[in-house]
């Protein structure tokens, strides 16, 4: 857990700014959390929050469950979108440019691999894609262990390279099915509560998706967290779980994106409860299960824009709010400095 001996000093600094108590709402909570994280290991609470080299890691992976027709697109689209990311043409690229955020794309196991020499392309494949979890385990226990380690190591390298704010995004046709199955299996919520429309499937596809998720979740009864990841997880989700653990071990804040990334965050907290301390929740997505997992994490997101894209887009859109929180904490005058009496 984070050392909270800095609580009083940080709270006092925020409360003494020239504003009514609590008048900056959630920005005060963000400033407090960033200051608390950055005070770890220091002799006193920091008086300057630094945001350096914010970076989003977009994890891409394919899913055998896509064979069941539970998505609007075939698995080939995952590769096409990865190429789009590398060419700079996706929404996440636009938002990264607008907000001065670095980006890396990670092939965790897409069906059609890419032979690309690109400085921001990382290949750490766990296989071609997961197995169809409607009929068998999505992956082996060894793949889960390897995926957790790869995600953790990559995130730690990015942090050691100078980034002190990380975000995770994902790309993978049918990955909302995997995320919904993980959420239901780990939380005890029903498949109906966890399964949503994804990026816009038909009612017939939606009903089939719920049935298949419920069928797979029934196999998970009595299993531990890593075994459930093997049964219904995705390669990109497993690596994101490891990425959250890596950020926690480096005391580095993570801006958490939408449904799939938030499910990975939830899994990480089940493996390591203190990982919750470094999470700042960017937005509430349009996916129905997202509200459920946010409640489980006692999270109040910064934005609610009706997003349902993934890629890390919501997290990157929230970066200016963190910069604003840091700026008021760093430079806003106190009542004493401004000569304001209350």
Image (cartoon, helix red, strand yellow):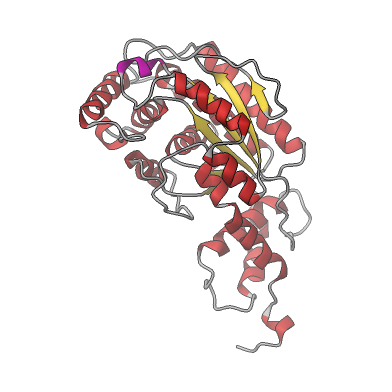
Is 261 situated above or below 314? above
- The image quadrant of residue 167 is top right
Image quarter of residue 101: top right
Q: List x then y, in percent, for residue 121.
A: 66, 26
Q: Is residue 254 visible?
A: no
The image shows residue 10 at horizontal and vertical percentages of 66, 64
Q: Is residue 334 magenta?
A: no
Residue 264 visible in the current orientation: yes
Between 133 and 314, the residue placed more toward the observer is 314
Give the magenta part as a residue range.
64-68
Residue at the spot x=42%, y=53% of the render?
A: 304
- How far across and how far down the image is residue 115, in percent? 64, 15
Task: Tell me what residue is drawn at x 52 percent, y 71 percent.
Answer: 22
322 or 23: nearer the viewer: 322
- Please identify the quarter of the rendering in which residue 337 is found: bottom right
Q: Position of residue 138 (x, y in %)?
A: 42, 14
Q: Say left or right for 278 vs 285.
A: right
Classify the position of the N terminus by image quarter.
top right
């Amino acid at each position: 857990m984070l050392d909270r001996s800095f609580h009083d000093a940080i709270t006092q600094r925020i409360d003494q700014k020239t504003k009514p108590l609590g008048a900056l709402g959630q920005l005060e909570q963000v400033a407090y959390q960033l200051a608390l994280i950055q005070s770890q290991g220091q002799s006193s609470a920091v008086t300057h929050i630094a945001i350096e080299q914010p970076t989003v890691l977009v994890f891409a992976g394919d899913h055998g469950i896509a064979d069941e027709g539970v998505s609007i697109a075939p698995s080939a689209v995952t590769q096409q979108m990865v190429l789009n990311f590398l060419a700079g043409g996706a929404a996440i690229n636009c938002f990264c440019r607008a907000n001065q955020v670095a980006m890396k794309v990670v092939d965790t196991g897409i069906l059609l691999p890419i032979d690309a020499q690109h400085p921001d392309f990382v290949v750490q494949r766990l296989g071609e894609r997961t197995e169809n979890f409607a009929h068998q385990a999505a992956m082996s226990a060894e793949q889960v262990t390897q995926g957790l380690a790869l995600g953790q190591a990559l995130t730690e390298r990015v942090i050691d390279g100078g980034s002190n704010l990380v975000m995770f995004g994902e790309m993978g046709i049918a990955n909302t099915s995997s995320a919904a199955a993980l959420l239901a299996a780990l939380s005890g919520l029903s498949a109906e509560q966890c399964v949503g429309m994804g990026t816009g499937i038909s009612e017939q596809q939606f009903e089939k998706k719920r049935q298949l998720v419920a069928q797979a979740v029934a196999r998970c009864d009595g299993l531990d967290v890593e075994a459930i990841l093997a049964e219904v997880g995705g390669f990109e989700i497993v690596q994101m779980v490891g990425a959250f653990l890596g950020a926690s071990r480096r005391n580095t804040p993570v801006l958490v994106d939408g449904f799939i990334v938030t499910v990975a965050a939830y899994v990480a907290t089940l493996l390591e409860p203190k990982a919750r301390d470094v999470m700042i929740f960017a937005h509430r997505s349009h996916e129905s299960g997202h509200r459920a997992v946010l409640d489980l994490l006692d999270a109040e997101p910064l934005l609610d824009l009706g997003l349902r894209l993934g890629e890390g887009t919501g997290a990157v859109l929230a970066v200016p709010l963190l910069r604003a929180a840091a700026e008021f904490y760093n430079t806003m005058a106190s009542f004493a400095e401004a000569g304001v009496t209350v």
